[in-house]
Amino acid sequence: MKDFTRLALDSALQQGADWADVRIVEIRGEQLYTRNGQIGGHSNSDSMGYGIRVLVQGAWGFASNNIFKQDVIEQTAAKAVATARASASLNREQVRLAPEPAHVDFWQTPYQEDPFKVALEEKLELLLQIDQVLSADDRIKVAEGRMSFRREHQHYLSSEGADIEQVLLRSGVGYSATAVGNDDVQIRSWPGTHGGNYRAEGYEFVRGLPLLTNAERIREEAIELLTAAEVPSGRRDIILHPSQMVLQIHESVGHASELDRVLGYEANYAGTSFATTDKLGSFRYGSEVVNLVADATLPGGLATAGYDDDGVKAQRWHIVKEGILTGYMTNRELASQVNLERSQGSNRAEGWYHLPITRICNLSLMPGSWEWDDLLADSEDAIYMETNKSWSIDQERLNFQFGCELAREVKGGKLGRLLKNPNYQSITPEFWGSCDAICNYKYWQLQGVANCGKGQPGQTAEMTHGSAPTRFRNIEVGIK
Amino acid sequence: MSVNNMRSRAEIQELLEQVHRQSPLETETVYSSGTQDLSRFANNEIRQNISQGSESLAIRTIIDGKSGVVSTGRLDTESIQRAVEQAVASARLQKADPECLPLQEQLEIKEQTRVDEETAALSPEDKAEAIRQVVDGLAGQKLEAAGIFSNSNSQFAIGNSNGMFHHHAATDAEFSITVSDGGEVSGWAESISRRVADLDTNALATEAIEIYRRALNPEPIDPGEYTVVLPPAAVTDFLLFLTWLGFGGQDYLEGTSPLSGKLGEQIAGSNITILDDPFHDRMSSAPFDGEGLPKKTLPFIEEGVLRQVAHDRRTANRSGLTSTGHGFPAPNPNGGYPTNLCLQPGEATIEEMIASTERGLLVTHFHYTNVVNPRDLSLTGMTRDGVFRIEDGKLTRPVHNLRFTDSVLRILNQVEMIGRDTNYASAFFGGGFVVPALKVNGFKFSSTTNF
């Protein structure tokens, strides 16, 4: 692997690059899927390729390929240089990268049990056992189970002398039950939505989850939702479980704090951000209890690594501190735009095929001080919501509307009847400004996002959001 | 083979036959490769400029109703042998699937390349020159342009150890542009086609500038029901969710589609006809599906009546039908669905729609449209890049952006006028559809913004 990285880097420099870096990435994946008592699919994937990024006259070029022949590597490097020259023909300002030491290091995700060495039969057996519990009632028309595992072996080399090897591992598991009846369709998922939950760990993550224990409850909730009352329309206090907070944090803070968006580099597709640089250090993003921390060192976080794809060492920093906007997700190119001497290290690419772009790091709402029972007791008339089902937010990251799989009435300080089709809508700073209670560290949990899409051409990234049950006051719910 | 990974059809066929010779089991192999070149500009400069190439195989082996799949991007002989061995081992470890079907036989399907040589040959310099002309057109206006200009070449082939082989090659191109003064007001335009010659980049830039200028100084507006005029770019997301959540045969059979049990019933206004047309001139689709079956032009909704849902081999077999040619390569847990929907045009121009509207809104397009409730196909999304009041048949003032929350099925029953011209427009979450403009009555906006 390392010989090819060196060949690609040398080739880019020989062909005229003023600066270059090369990432060779080898990706192994395994996906298992069960559906209604059958194995819906089992696949292994294996991919290895290289991405060559160059600066010529201060302008970017990038080319990638997965053919490891000397002539193809050289031609790919030439393409990277040619695209950079084309960029330079138009650009007025030269890219200047924030300084970073040329790290030489090896880093790997800590894990206990290699998921690729766990017998396929054992993994399938667990999913089929869960399926059996989910399918035990005729009203469940679709029972689905999933596992996925991914190992990414990277070698990064830069013309500045960085030489970084990393092995990143993650495991994911989840299931859902879809009930049909009473002229309705309802779904429940566990331990998270969008395929389950994911963690930068080995198979111990799967073993550590009470997957079978929760399957019966999930089945019964899906069935009960068929005849549940709709969430009423109007303004209510809401309490959000971490399985919904994950998307709330992701969409209304994570993407809004990506500095490339803030500066207009995503204006044509994903949009820009209301959290402009003139607001840094002074804008009230939320109430004083709101602390949002980006952390590339978070144990188990999907964005946790030793270094990002700029070769910048992992860091931990506040995005929102005591309710005030205090930071951004940055890369080396843009860090100086907010007077940072060094990038925060949030530049990442999907595999070898794509160009690194500014991504959300692991981003968590820090725990508060509330016990769960005290939070309920303090809530006279509220709606509790769990598990994201629907999400949409405008191009400035202000007006959002989310839906959840399940809600419960909170009356007189107690959890009450089940409600279906819950949703809520608000404006980002107003919403976070209405946050008045966050449960403590005992209720804090990590939810992984494995499908964050961004960029043109689109690419996905993975990150984790930690949170505890959180209350927001006087929010519009039941939008029809 | 060139640096662009463009093996010839014969080379690909030989590669797949090599896989099948190496496998002791019944085997199906899908080949895909391509290059994607994309110049991305923002703040009047090219900030990302890429050229990506890749090729891969997905190998599926079958034994006694059990199948194993391995995909690999390593196409040397040794790696292919290892992938075949993994797929064989994986198949043997599975449990038998009672719905597992034998390998597809070769059917006569006329291959039709969708390669446009000019598109295939478009260079980074060509794209930079086009972007330069657009940026030069903004000179002195204190405006900023952001957008993309892309071209791609792709090849897709499917074959199996029964001797089936089909191959398809295509090109695609896209130009889109957002113009603003760096503030919250912007204008936007886009064009996609398999031929770059269809993209008039300067005209698109002019259109985006005109929308931006019209959108300046927007006024507050209350949410509520409005008559709306929706250009094609604002219609395409409706078809995306109709196909994802409504037209799939598996969902239809399992009762999870909002259309389940409604074949032959009136589900939309009698002025609505939606075809799936994989042969549409602007699209680059293959004439065969991911299971090697021929695609056809099929009416899904005809004069408002649901006529068709999409079946792959598995759901067709389950329901005693034949596949409609909407399969994806196995394993595919989601069943078949159509990807080439075309909403049939009417007779009106957008100007006539506006002139016939006493009080309403003209929307440029929507952002981040997503499903709210799959049961009634209700969606939510935000207006973007300009919303304008229509008063007494004339376009008047720009207004703040609004969020809609409404059902696609309800919308398709509220269409008063349909545009005579169609456009191939992209959906936010991917894909594209050929759609006309629509005038829709009683369209529901549920909240608003202050920009």
Image (cartoon, helix red, strand yellow):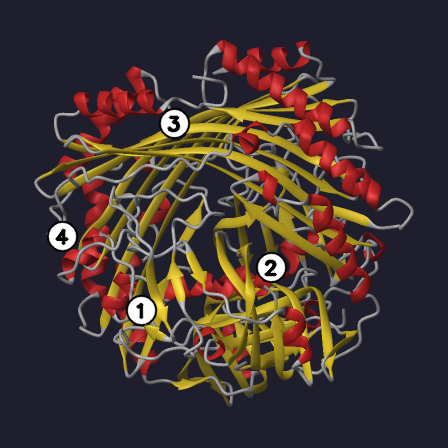
Q: How many marks?
A: 4
Type of amino acid at the residue the image marks with label 1: Ile
* Cα gap from disc 2 to disc 4, whole angstroms: 40 Å
Rounded to the nearest whole Å, what is the CA distance between mark 4 and mark 3? 29 Å
Quickly name the residue at label 1: A218
Say which residue label 3 marks: B73
Disc 1 from disc 4: Cα separation: 27 Å
Residue B367 image offset from top left, x and y in percent: 61, 62
Callout 3: helix, strand or loop?
Answer: loop
User: Which amino acid is tagged 4?
Assistant: Glu
Mark 3 is on which residue type? Gly
- Residue A467's image quarter? bottom right
- Calculate the distance from the C-alpha at mark 3 to the C-alpha at mark 2: 33 Å
Nearer mark to the viewer, of 3 and 2: 3
- Mark 3 Cα-neighbour bin, 10 Å: few <14, some 14–19, many ≥20: many
Q: Amino acid at mark 2?
A: Glu
- Other-residue count near label 1 (Cα within 10 Å), few / some / many at <14 / 14–19 / ≥20: many
Q: Secondary structure at mark 4?
A: loop
**Labels 4 and 3 touching (C-beta < 8 A):** no
Query: Are the numbered discs 4 and 3 placed on the same chain, yes or no?
Result: yes
Residue B240 numbered mark, or none: none
Are dots 1 and 2 on a single chain?
Answer: yes
Instruction: Kindly identify the residue that appears in the image at 23 percent across and 65 percent down.
Output: A134
